[in-house]
Amino acid sequence: MSAPLPVVTPEELTRTWLSSALGREVTGVTATPVGTGQMGACYRLDLSGDASLPATLLAKLPTIDPAGRDFLHGSYAIEVTFYRDLLPTLDVRAPAASYAAISDDPAQRGVFTLLLDDLAPAEQGDQILGCTPDQARAAVENVAGLHAPRWADPTLLDVDGLSLPGPDDADLLDAVFGGAVDTTLAQLGGLVGEDDAALLRAVAPYAGRWSTARLDRFGLVHGDYRLDNLMFHDDGRVWAVDWQTLSVGLPVRDVAFLVGTGLETDARRAHERDLVAAYHRRLVDLGVFGYDADTCWEDYRFGLLQGPLIAVLGCAYSSTRTERGDRMFGVMISRSMQAIRDLGTLEILGA
């Protein structure tokens, strides 16, 4: 039986469709919405049928708006590529996909479907609340499993949707980031302090050149490796989800983003050297060589610009503004600005 075509709505996730997609008989299915669905929709599927079926799966679907699907096609496609083609080559912990497909019909551009393992009882992290140092350590060791197996692997550049950022990308980022900073500061108002706003404006002109620097040590980058995109289990395991921002770049940017925005400032100051060292040891354990711990630390300091970059672009271009979202972006900017201040990142950017 050939795999079915991807679908758009939960009503299309019928028993017949699921039986074909999973290769096992499904006799009953109930779909319950999960999350806010800003770039699409996610549903928990309660399944019955073949004894080998999981009790539940998560289904990710695109936005129902055709124009939105067209705009988001690249993000949808890279997530499907991650689950279908890249994850089997990596050591990062992420939910396994039972089905991953995106339409190649131009009339169905952006139509994709993912059926993923339900990670319950693991719980989503909370970007505003922050995480413990132990959770941060589990997260940075996990992301080393994304970076190490394909470290400086030129075949990554043959994957559709992946390429090293170049001058045109840097120019585009420079063209939009300054305006995005102004928009974000206007939206967040008092959630961003005056000193943080001034520093944010000071680092903004470096975004383009930062994005193309230090690419002799490139690798896969999650790009949005923050607590809301991590699932934590009581036994210490952590999974990364939401792979629509996957790209190629300086790998330690993911570590800088997680640590710089996910830990309260005092905890970050107390633990960040140990966390970066733990990440580096995991890289070495997974086969990375010629990348010493001191260089990794300097890349971490340099990579802290990932925090304000993602927070600002996320805030300025979010299609749905919420009170929690504003608070989250404000916290991310505050924590990352303090990290940039503490570690002299602005001086590195200007060197």
Image (tube, helix red, strand yellow):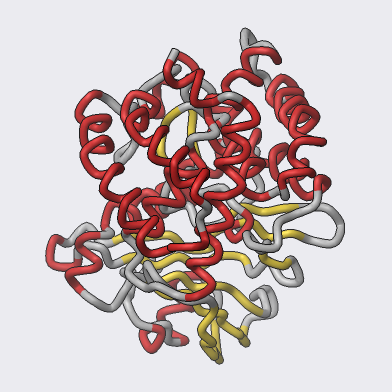
Q: Nearer the viewer, residue 102 or 324?
A: 324
In the image, residue 325 above or below residue 18? above
Residue 213 in which image quadrant: top left
Judged from this view, the residue extending furthest toward the top is 290
Residue 290 in which image quadrant: top right
In the image, residue 157 above or below residue 190? above
Give the residue displayed 68% in from the left and 60% down from the top. 231
In the image, residue 351 above or below residue 252? above
In the rendered structure, the answer to whether residue 79 lies left or right of residue 236 reads left
Residue 273: x and y in percent read 76, 27
Residue 29 appears anywhere in the view: yes
Q: Nearer the viewer, residue 345 or 66?
A: 345
Give the residue displayed 42% in from the left and 33% down from the top. 203
Residue 268: x and y in percent read 74, 40
Quadrant in which the C terminus is drawn = top left
Residue 338 in which image quadrant: top right
Give the residue displayed 41% in from the left and 38% down from the top. 247
Q: How many marks?
A: 0
In the rendered structure, the answer to whether residue 320 lies left or right of residue 119 reads left
Residue 136: x and y in percent read 74, 45
Residue 158 appears anywhere in the view: no
Quadrant in which the N terminus is drawn = bottom left
Judged from this view, the residue extending furthest toward the front is 194
Q: Nearer the viewer, residue 345 or 87?
A: 345
Judged from this view, the residue extending furthest toward the right is 235
Residue 255: x and y in percent read 62, 36
Give the residue displayed 49% in from the left and 68% down from the top. 325
